[in-house]
Amino acid sequence: MKRHACWLVLALGCAGPDDPRTLDSGLDTSDSAGTLDDETDELPDVPGDSGDGDGDSGDGDSGDGDGDGDSGDGDGDGEVYGPPLYPDARVHSPINVYARDNLASIRALAPTAPEDVFMKIGASSTVSPSTLYCFADGMAELDIHEQTLGPTLDHFLLGQAGDTTPFDRDTLAAESGRTAGWAIEGAPSPVDQERAAIHPEGPSLALVHYGTNDMQQGITYASAMPAYYANMSDLLDLLINAGVVPIVFGISRRLDLEAADLWVQTYNAVARGLAQARTIPFIDLRHALEPLPGYGISGDGIHLEGFNGGPCILSPEGLTHGYNVRNLIALEGLDRARRSLLADDTLDEPTLQLEGLGDIDDPLEIPALPFADTNSTVDAPSLMLDVYSGCEALADETGPENIYRVELAELTAIRAMVLDREGVDVDLHLLDDSASEAGCIARGDRMIETTLAPGTYYFALDTFVNGQGVEQGGAYTFVVLACEDGDVDCL
């Protein structure tokens, strides 16, 4: 049956809002094909049947929520209480006890914000009438997802976002062709304007979707990355500090430009790493769209296409179209966040966690590609690597370093990047299995692209020391991934 907006059928028993749970813990997943958005932007999402971890296998005790680990080992099966790694090949990032507590700690910064109001932040994909609006027009069909997602849809349909619902509100924090930098520019910024306008207490969640336009802001896709990283970092931190839980969307394929498409996974790896560092939800849109005909993308090669019966028809037929999948995954993401904030027992257990100390004897382990880690070289455990002679380098790297190890089972073209902020200079070094200065294979201030034979390799994220003898150590995000087939830069 068609769903109708909850505010039209309260007498039929739509679910009301739940009381918020505020735990205290530490912070650090219709437009027909002819109706398209006009400007370059990123796009869609995907269904929850491919590794979304919605299962109810979790039995962890949430503890008192103070983040000190008194909830035991997590799920009772030996998992250490700590942040999960966000692996590839799943639509929704995992939620363990630590992640659940972390979302509650963010919400505790603004406990009076309504739990049934979310805000939308992005560009043309976000402002498209095919994105989310249809959940409020009475024509949505959840099909087999009714039982699991129906209560969450009803919950947010009751939310008062300005003079409408969060689904069909025309957000001030999204415009076609915009970037993450635009969202936080000005006083007040578009994000601040929307937070104030959507509700006097602000929203509790935010759907954040940037990357496609950001890719175009440099001479190369690589040169555009630092600004994307900095702007997204600031945007996510602004929301978190305001007590809003961001849900970060990756970007979909770029069929308009082959060179751009080869960089989509790198931008997604960085977006995933930014979310992982803050233990907030990430939704892999590209992965969700991969099974669809034409990847769910319209004839312009950038924007999604939708089912002609409506983009919120979540039937098997509807879910062969891009916007329909995107709407399903967005609703799943809202559902997972809502249930996490209720501290229910639906957890993704066990989850992968970062292992190792970061020195040569006990390096940080890269379990699979793509991999991301946000860390710092301040007080890093290793001081053994100073001048990387194998790369004929003269740079003074006498500051502390973090060392990572990866095992490659086959010939692999890789792209590795380190991203830091002003005042920090952490350099990237690729070493052979000797993990020595003489074993340096390649180095870069920001990026290494090469092809590696099967074997053991190390990455040293090392602190540069300037000409005045001052260590330029600090926080960084490190990502490494296998390059796309056909990416000649990685050969």
Image (cartoon, rainbow, N blue to C red):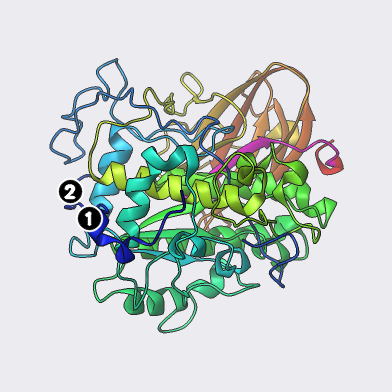
Label 1 sits on what residue type? Gly
Q: Is residue 278 left or right of residue 272?
A: left
Q: Is residue 252 visible?
A: yes
> Which stretch is magenta?
474-487
Q: Residues within 10 Å of mark 2 (few under 14, many from 20)?
A: some
User: Residue at coordinates 45% horizontally, 33% vertically from top-left?
Assistant: 85
Whether the residues at callouts 2 and 1 have beta carbons within 8 Å, the answer is no
Number of numbered discs on residues: 2
Does residue 486 show up magenta in the picture? yes
Looking at the image, residue 337 lies above or below residue 466:
above
Q: Residues within 10 Å of mark 1 (few under 14, many from 20)?
A: some
User: Residue at coordinates 50% horizontally, 65% vertically from top-left?
Assistant: 133
Q: Is residue 290 left or right of residue 245?
A: right
- Which mark lies nearer to you, 2 or 1? 1
Mark 2–mark 1 Cα distance, whole angstroms, equals 15 Å
Residue 309: x and y, percent? 63, 55
Does residue 12 show up magenta in the picture? no
Looking at the image, residue 486 lies above or below residue 221:
above
Residue 475 is tagged as: none
- Which of 376 and 309 lies nearest the eye of the viewer? 309
- Which of 381 and 21 lies nearest the eye of the viewer? 21
Q: Is residue 392 visible?
A: no
Tell me the quadrant of the picture where the C terminus can be found.
Answer: top right
- Which of 28 and 96 lies nearest the eye of the viewer? 96
Which residue, given by chain and number where applicable, does mark 2 sit on? 21
Residue 16 is tagged as: 1
Label 2 sits on what residue type? Arg
Residue 370: x and y, percent? 61, 34
